[in-house]
Image: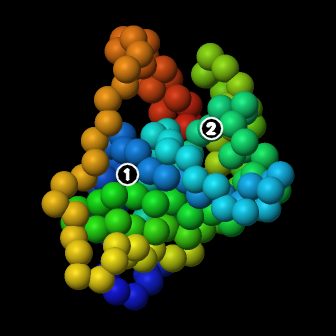
Amino acid sequence: MSEAVTQLTESLLQQFKHETFVLLNTVDLEFGGPTSTAISWIYAENASTLRVALDHRSRLVKNMMHNPLITVTVFGEEMVYAINGRASVRQDPLQDVPFNMCCFDISIEAVRNALFYGAQLSSVPQYVKIYDQRAAEKLDEQVFAAMKKA
């Protein structure tokens, strides 16, 4: 993919149907510059919309409410993708979760290969949750179920 497209590829759509982590890049409300945070509560509603859930204590919520322009950086099969879009509040607060969260929809405007020329990923980065595994699974189930109902 050398030119931008306006929807997720089939492989990215499938990747976003399962838990994955991304870098969510926003414009920082306080400093006016770019900021990047790793998140995992994200999934593809369809090929042109991503949905994210964020803890209200996160700066990202205020950043996105003030300036909806975002970039999601995702590590896919052999490539790093930059997904540009606009965030809008889907549900605030997100219902049926144990703490105050905000749910956003991201309308995808462009999907680009962000990996430098002549390179490809040999594997997708993986992560492990280092807190109580049962609590993590329960919370993830609650958040994803609430996001899908939003």
In x, y percent, where is residue 84?
A: 55, 70
Disc on res. 61: none
Secondary structure under the numbered disc 1 in the rendered image = loop
For image coordinates 28% across by 41% down, the residue present is 126
In x, y percent, where is residue 55?
A: 65, 32
Using the image as rendered, state which of residue 112 and residue 118 is in the foreground. Answer: 118
Q: Amino acid at mark 1?
A: Phe
In x, y percent, where is residue 117?
A: 30, 83
Q: Earlier in the sequence, mark 1 or mark 2?
A: 1
Q: Taking 41 as reference, is 124 left or right?
A: left
Residue holding disc 1: 16
For image coordinates 62% across by 38% down, the residue present is 54
| Quadrant in which the C terminus is drawn | top right
Residue holding disc 2: 54
For image coordinates 45% across by 26% down, the residue present is 140
| Mark 1, other Cα within 10 Å: few <14 / some 14–19 / many ≥20 | many
Q: Please tell me whether mark 1 or mark 2 is closer to you in this view.
A: 2
In x, y percent, where is residue 113?
A: 37, 76
Q: Amino acid at mark 2?
A: Leu
How far is the residue under mark 1 from the one under mark 2? 17 Å
Residue 106 seen by the camera: no
Q: Is residue 99 above or below residue 2?
A: above
Q: Taking 61 as reference, is 79 left or right?
A: left
Q: Is residue 65 above or below residue 128?
A: below
Secondary structure under the numbered disc 2 in the rendered image = strand
Using the image as rendered, state which of residue 123 and residue 1 is in the foreground. Answer: 123
For image coordinates 56% across by 47% down, the residue present is 37
